[in-house]
Amino acid sequence: MKAINVGLLGIGTVGGGTFTVLKRNEEEITRRAGRPIRITAVADKNLELARKVAGEGPRLTDDAFSVVTDPEIDIVVELIGGYGVAKELVLKAIENGKHVVTANKALLAVHGNEIFAAAQKKGVMVAFEAAVAGGIPIIKALREGLSANRIQWLAGIINGTTNFILSEMRDKGLPFAEVLKEAQALGYAEADPTFDIEGIDAAHKATIMSAIAFGVPMQFSAAHVEGITALDSVDITYAEQLGYRIKLLGISRMRPEGIELRVHPTLIPAKRLIANVEGAMNAVVVFGDAVGPTLYYGKGAGAEPTASAVIADLVDVTRLHTADPEHRVPHLAFQPDQVRDLKVLPIDEVITSYYLRMRVEDKPGVLADITRILADSGISIEAMIQKEAPEGASQTDIIMLTHETVEKNANAAIAKIEALPVVQGRITRLRMESLQ
């Protein structure tokens, strides 16, 4: 059958991996897709790099717009990244009747609603498996494999950089700043790691998963986002003593009042499989009412793992290239007219448990005062550690784990405890999830 012609925008790490894997596994991919898939045009500002990776076979250009308007191109693969020119190129490709495959989580989380609406109107597909968790097929699992279920919640380690940093802080007892430098030296963290360590990258991915799981629009601007920059290694140690691990999680949960959508450091029981995901690996737990908890684990980044997801999308689009648009899997799993505009709940309305660490004067009655405030706020204690004050010291640490409560109640109680004369400085507060 006639080959599918692909225009590749960006031939950096993932683009190069896509070109390499597609060429290496050409026969196997053709057997699966039903026709050859060939990259016939490559756009990159660095033509020397493009020539080195792609050779002389495809048309090489530094003008990406010439690719998205090329009548010979069937599918455009966007691997440029960012919100700016990538958005223009994707919309122009759609306008010209091209299907689009993208790994651009930031673009979809922020502008996905506009892009999907344009694609729906034009009758073309936008595929984005590579946008979340690299080579893990979590988008396909949510859109297709779990389509019989009401998804109740999902939680994921979806940023390898932060997971590597937290793993090293736990294993070596080192402070955040020191481990960040190590991560940069090893290539796990960018020179400017802001998107990773501040939780923004994870929030982009959580936004996409939430939209598919619950059939709602992309709502990145409503997500609650916290990173790991303020995390103290002492809290990782105390968490271990209490039987927990700290991970940066992207969490989304359906509740009667709306949807929770949040990214923050989270205590997880150490016996959970996801708590034992170490280094730069990714993992996502999805809980469906029929199937219960399911776990998806693998490499969340890298040239060939991400290329695996890009090419899986190319195969899917090729299979459905001539299909009636109504017979294709909807972009957000639910039929477009069934997407519901449910609100994302403010963080004050989130219900979860808490880890509290407070520095207090080592004197009688302190613990009674603190527990009384928590009880008055309807917050019960699940576990507690009271450290012995070092010889000659007048202060010590109290660590408490609470049962579930509404965030605004926890905040009010913490403010009252911090106002006690015997409590020194701010209380460290981390959220907890049982994930069961």
Image (cartoon, rainbow, N blue to C red):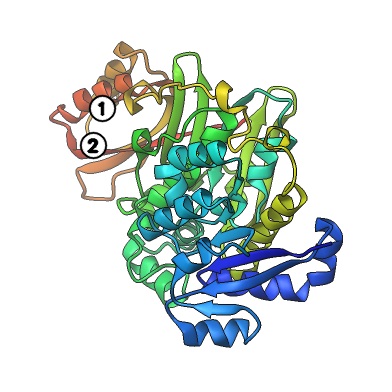
| Count of numbered badges drawn on the protein | 2
Q: Position of residue 361 (x, y in %)?
A: 20, 36
Looking at numbered disc 2 in the image, what kind of residue is underneath it?
Asp
**What residue is disc 2 on?**
362
Residue 205 visible: yes
Residue drawn 58% across the image and 53% down it? 98
- SS category of the residue bearing label 2: loop
Q: Position of residue 182 (x, y in %)?
A: 41, 73
Looking at numbered disc 1 in the image, what kind of residue is underneath it?
Ile
Q: Nearer the viewer, residue 23 or 135?
A: 23
Task: Determine which quarter of the picture holds residue 417.
Answer: top left
**What residue is disc 1 on?**
414
Q: Position of residue 296 (x, y in %)?
A: 67, 46
Please tell me how crowded label 1 is: few (under 14), some (14-19), or many (20+) other residues with Cα within 10 Å. Answer: many
Task: Determine which quarter of the picture holds residue 407.
Answer: top left
Residue drawn 54% across the image and 42% down it? 119
Q: Nearer the viewer, residue 165 or 333?
A: 333
Residue drawn 74% across the image and 25% down it? 148
Q: Residue furthest right?
A: 31
Residue 403 visible: no
**In which quadrant will I find the N terminus?**
bottom right
Residue drawn 42% across the image and 41% down it? 263
Q: Is residue 219 above or below residue 254?
A: below
Q: Nearer the viewer, residue 163 or 112?
A: 112
Please tell me how crowded label 2 is: few (under 14), some (14-19), or many (20+) other residues with Cα within 10 Å. Answer: some
Alpha-carbon span between mark 1 and mark 2: 19 Å
Lateral position of residue 245 relative to residue 263, left or right:
right
